[in-house]
Amino acid sequence: MKALQLIFIIFFFSSLNLTSQEKEVKITVEKLTDRVYVLKGQGGNIGLFIGDDCVFMIDDQFAPLSKKIQAAIKTITDKPVTYLINTHWHGDHTGGNANFQKEGAIIVSHENVRKRMSVDQIVRGEKRLASPEEALPVITFSEDMQFYMNKEPILITHVHNAHTDGDVLVYFVNSNVLHVGDAYFQGKFPYIDIDSGGSIDGYIKGIKTIMRITDTTTKIIPGHGKVTTKEELKEYLEMLEDLKTQIFKEIEKGASLKDVKNNAKITEKYKGYNGWITEDKIKEAIYKSLKIK
C-alpha cells in the first residue's frame, strides 16, 4: 500500500508541475516586417506571414499551447491560418498540427516528415509513438516548392541530412526573411539527430546553403534562439568545421568515443555554445556521425 501511495503522490505532483509549466508559458510576438512575424513560447520559433486573405504559418510548438498561439495570432490578424509548414518532424515543431488542421490549416512538409510522423521513432534513446492521422501533413514534396501570396514568393527548400532528413528552409523573398528551423540553433551547439538521418556533414552543408540564400540584411529566424544575421552564421560555420576537423583527426589516430569526450581541448574555445546540447553531446554526435560515414 505504501508503495502505491508513493507512486500516486509522485504522479500527482508531476501532473501539477506539468500543468503549472503550461500555465506559465507566454507566447510573445515580434514583428520583423509589415507582413512577417515570429512567435516564441515553448518549443520551436513560429514564423507567420500575414496575407490579405489568410495566414501562412511555420511550425506550431506543442499541442497544449495551440489555444495560446491562436490567441496570439489574433492580436495580429483575424485572418485564418490557411497553410502550415513543418520545418521537420520533431514534436516541439509539429505538436499542434492536429489542432490547427482541425481549424482548417493545410499542413505541408518534406516527404520524410510525414514518413517519420507516421511510424514510431527513437529520439535520444526513447521511443516516440506515431502521430495520429489528423496530425500528418497532407501535402509533401521531395526537394523544393514555392508559394505565392500577395506578390510575395515564398521558397521552401530541402536541406539534406542536417538536423534530420526532412529539414526545410522557408524564405520570404521580397521581405528578405528566412526561417531555418533547427538547421540552425542560434548561439548554441546544434542537436544533430542521427537516428532521424541527421549528420555533421549535412548540417555544415545546410549552414552553407543558408549563407548562399542570405545577404547582410536578411533576418534569419532560427529554430531556437534570437532572430539573427548572416555575420553570426559565419562564426557558427567556422565552429562546426573546426570541431569536425579536430574529431576526424582523432578518429584517424584511433581514438574511441570516450577518448574524444575526455579531450577537453577539442571544445575549449567554444564553451559559450553550451546549452542543452553540451560539449560532450556535440562531440559524441559528430564522432558517431563521422564513424557512420
Image (cartoon, rainbow, N blue to C red):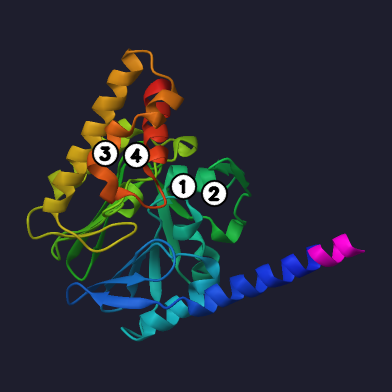
Disc assigned to residue 117: 2
Place of residue 134 in the rendered image (x, y in percent of width and height, measured from the top left): 58, 61
Which is closer to the viewer, label 3 or label 2? 3
Q: Quadrant of the N terminus?
A: bottom right
The residue to which callout 3 is attached is 268
Q: Secondary structure at mark 3?
A: helix
Q: Secondary structure at mark 1?
A: helix
Quadrant in which residue 153 is drawn: bottom left
Q: Earlier in the sequence, mark 3 or mark 1?
A: 1
Tell me whether circle 3 and circle 4 mark residues in contact (CB < 8 Å).
no
The amino acid type, in three-letter code, at marker 4 is: Ala
Would you call the spot at circle 2 few (<14 residues within 10 Å), some (14-19), or many (20 or more)?
many
Instruction: Tell which of 10 and 213 is nearer to you.
Output: 10
Which is closer to the viewer, label 3 or label 4? 3
Q: Secondary structure at mark 2?
A: helix
Left/right placement of residue 160 relative to residue 140 reads left
Tell me whether circle 4 and circle 1 mark residues in contact (CB < 8 Å).
no
Tell me whether circle 3 and circle 2 mark residues in contact (CB < 8 Å).
no
Left/right placement of residue 126 relative to residue 59 reads right
Which is closer to the viewer, label 3 or label 1? 3
The residue to which callout 1 is attached is 113
Q: Which residues make up the magenta segment?
A: 1-6
Q: What is the spatial separation of the Cα atoms under label 1 and label 2, in whole angstroms? A: 6 Å
Disc assigned to residue 162: 4
Would you call the spot at circle 3 few (<14 residues within 10 Å), some (14-19), or many (20 or more)?
few
Q: Earlier in the sequence, mark 3 or mark 4?
A: 4
Tell me whether circle 1 and circle 2 mark residues in contact (CB < 8 Å).
yes
Q: Residue furthest left?
A: 216
Which is closer to the viewer, label 4 or label 1? 4
